Image (tube, helix red, strand yellow):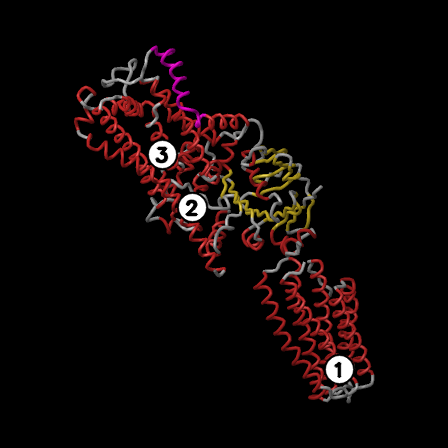
Amino acid sequence: MHRLLDRGLEQLTAMVFNMGKVAEKALAISIDGFVREKDTSGDVHELSEILLSLTVEVEEKAFGLIAKYQPVASDLRIINSYMKIAYDFERYGRYAWDICFIRKRLGGLKDCEEWIPHFIEEMGEKVLQMVRTSINSLKNQDTDLAKAISKTEQEVDEMYFQYLDKLVKEAHVTGQCTTSSVLVVRYLERIADHATYIAEAVVYIATGQKITLR
Amino acid sequence: MTTLRMSNKNGETAVNLEQVRPEAKMQSIALNAWFGSKQALKDINLTVKANAVTAIIGPSGCGKSTFIRCLNRMHELVPNARMSGQVLLDGKNIYSKETDSVQIRRRVGMVFQKPNPFPTMSIYDNVAAGLKLTGTKKGQNLDEIVKKSLQQATLWDEVKDDLKKPGTGISGGQQQRLCIARAIALQPEVILMDEPCSALDPIATAKIEELIVQLKNDYTVVIVTHNMQQAARVSDFTAFMYLGQLVEFDDTTSMFENPKSELTEKYITGKFG
Amino acid sequence: MTNYSLRKFKNQLFFILCAACVIIAIIPLLSILYEVVSRGAPQLSINFLTQKDADGGIGPAIQGTLILIGLTSIIGIPVGVLSGVYLAEFGNNKYAASIRTVNDVLTEFPSIVVGITAFGVVVLGIIGSYSPLAGAVALSFILIPVVARTTEESLKLVPNSVREASLALGVHKWRTTLSVVLPAAKGGLVTGTLLAIARIAGETAPLIMTILGNSYFFQGFSSPMDALPLRIWRDSLQPYANLQAQGWGAALVLILIVLSLNIAVRVASRGRLRR
């Protein structure tokens, strides 16, 4: 039975999925640019701005649906979660931009020893994989896929602390390299966190259970 | 046939409701009801907790009104109506042979869908009617009781200067509060409300909802409503009925955030076709 | 003729026909009133209204009618009202259905048969002579079914929600009926009763063999008594002009009594409807 609310939900869903697509693109471009020493700040900035305005639209749409239809049960969980997920996508865009900006402002990794760009490339791959997993699990309402994200999340966390430890021990790294790399690694770790939040929201929508996947 | 689960904050507990629950103010056990050959209620096991508001929701014809009319023995007043099973009030079956139905109705009051103040009586007489007509007024200060009941029903301030006005000479929302005051005047233990707001405008409805939330301090309230948001707003526990059966019973927050039965989910989200 | 003007013509024709029928229907009433008033009014005087037959008055007849109305009311109204209460409040079974049918038949009963029955049972049987009581009994036979039916109808007009409200308070059924339902139906009850009384005030056939008629005022419960309908009938059969004139006067008085009862009903209803 097609309810009035369903049309609104379809529109809201389309908006959120669109945000996911844009956010993923922004992150892929940004991380790739950082590792390959390319300036992608123009494109990424544009995508980040799109995400900002889409967040506002999603919020307004969600509030409108709540005010008009007083949704309950699964409808309410979906709308609630989509608002949070939109914020997570906006964060993706923000961090994508931050990564570009670090390269632009501080010069990136060109001064670093060879192992560092490889490390960050590897970590970047893992995080991008998590981002794609989060978006796919949302699209397909796949709670198993969502729950599997916790494994990768732990790996990323491990890599994060590994890097910090290693950096403290290695004395011969330039200040520029240290600052750039630490900030970027930090951003990557935060992106991974947001991917986990999205996966948790997917589980909540489907089951009504609030779990932590960290 | 129907498994009943009571969910509390620590998780789910399956309960065998063939046993009497001590914290229950009222409890129905294997309650069945018929109108002639048509069965209106099928094996209802439900607990009404004391000093709480229990809402009963469900589509038209699901048996909600029939159920609460079994709680104050009004069901049997319909020709060809019969029931089986037990209804316990404070642990005692109200349908036992020694129990006087009239006494039960004094302990379990009722407010109806359409406000029905007595047309030939003034506001004052309406509120006092229960006491006068049941002979429980001896030795009581009627003025005091009328005032207190109207105050509890949040109607006192609006009518205190004109208590002799006919009961039908006030607005619909005020009439309904008058009916509530009339029911309260007898100091019942349980108040049953059969869609009390469905004939009222939104402002009157809001006033009655506020009143219901206050009433639960002194009374146990069971409210039948087809407005789910109203059930979500005022009740502590909600029961969902469908085609004469109790489908789900839970605390209100859980039921409206994450219902356990798919049928419940479909009904409360409006996906019933 | 165009379609429209044809339709208009048909409309007007129909209207004229209906109006004509109404006038034809009213003419008898108007002519009766005219005859009675024009022939009876000259008779009216204090003497006429209060003196007995020999002195040129219809006092005994008026007294008789009033006594009959009183006795019939005492016997008939309680029985009729309570029967109506039974049928409305407790009458959901097959016994009540039969009672209702019998009641409806009785309302249409030929009044002469009622009179003969009362003659046989009361005059010949219980009392042994013509008696105002016999007349009251006969008139009650006519009054009770009518009052029972109108009582039942009035009570049925009281919405069930009012009864439910009372029962839900824990009020016994008899108390509910007495203190909540009857007062609510009061208007209908009064109207129905007054109309029934207006009807029996004019009944003649039942009186012929029960109170017989008398030239003197009330003489006890074992003697014949006069009443307006009887007086009218007897006077009309007399060959004397002055007695016939008396008859017209009596007719006028009777019509005035019936009319005033009807007007009382209208006044009472109007007050109710306005509220």
The numbered mark at residue C175 is none
Q: Amino acid at mark 2?
A: Leu
Taking A207 as reference, is B109 above or below it?
above
Q: Chain of mark 3?
A: C
Q: Quadrant of the C terminus of chain C?
A: top left
Question: Magenta stretch: dominant SS?
Answer: helix
Identify the residue at horizontal 31%, vertical 32% (top origin). C258
Residue pointed to by mark 2: B178
- Determine crowd level at label 2: few under 14, some 14-19, many 20+ residues with C-alpha closer than 10 A: many
Q: Label 1, secondary structure: give it.
A: helix
Q: Amino acid at mark 1?
A: Ile
Find out whether residue C55 is within the magenta segment. no
- Determine crowd level at label 3: few under 14, some 14-19, many 20+ residues with C-alpha closer than 10 A: some
Q: Position of residue A74 (x, y in %)?
A: 67, 59
Front in this rendered view, residue C6 or B119 = C6
- Whether residues under marks 2 and 3 lie with C-beta atoms below 8 angstroms apart, the answer is no
Front in this rendered view, residue B219 or A122 = B219
Alpha carbon of mark 3 to alpha carbon of mark 1: how far? 94 Å
Q: Position of residue A91 (x, y in %)?
A: 67, 75
Residue pointed to by mark 3: C190
Residue pointed to by mark 1: A29
Q: Is residue A210 left or right of residue B219?
A: right
Alpha carbon of mark 2 to alpha carbon of mark 3: how far? 29 Å
